[in-house]
Image: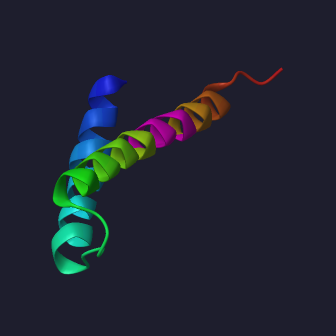
């Protein structure tokens, strides 16, 4: 699970969003370290949410009919 969260959330969502939102569309009040922390935590949250959604879908599909 944590591998998925780190890879899918932090690496593939948080890191690109950090670069886009820090260097292409900069926020006037956020420093670069603040932006990095914000987007890495946001990416971890996104990855965790995606893990939970996909696990729920998997359980729903593999449930035995009664």
Q: Residue furthest front?
A: 29
User: Residue 25: where, in percent of width, then height?
Assistant: 26, 79
The correct choice, above or below, for 30 with respect to 13 in the image is below
Q: Nearer the viewer, residue 20 or 34?
A: 34
User: Residue 64: where, in percent of width, then height?
Assistant: 71, 21
Q: Residue furthest right?
A: 66
The correct choice, above or below, for 23 with respect to 55 in the image is below
- Report the number of discs: 0
**Colour style of the rendered protein structure:** rainbow
Q: Residue at x 50, y 40 (%)?
A: 49
Q: Nearer the viewer, residue 52 or 35?
A: 35
Image quadrant in which the C terminus is located: top right
Residue 54 appears left or right of 2: right
Q: Nearer the viewer, residue 60 or 6?
A: 6
Q: Nearer the viewer, residue 27 or 61?
A: 27
Q: Residue at x 21, y 46 (%)?
A: 11
Q: Residue at x 35, y 42 (%)?
A: 41
Image quadrant in which the N terminus is located: top left
Magenta region: 47-53
Q: Residue at x 19, y 51 (%)?
A: 33
User: Residue 18: where, in percent of width, then height?
Assistant: 23, 60
Residue 3 appears left or right of 19: right
The correct choice, above or below, for 28 with respect to 2 in the image is below
Q: Check if residue 23 falls in the magenta segment.
A: no
Q: Check if residue 50 falls in the magenta segment.
A: yes
């Amino acid at each position: 699970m944590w591998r998925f969260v780190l890879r899918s959330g932090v690496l593939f969502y948080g890191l690109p969003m950090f670069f886009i939102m820090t260097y292409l569309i900069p926020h006037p009040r956020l420093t670069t370290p603040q932006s990095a922390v914000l987007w890495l935590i946001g990416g971890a949250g996104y990855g965790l949410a995606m893990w939970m959604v996909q696990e729920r879908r998997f359980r729903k599909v593999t449930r035995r009919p009664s």
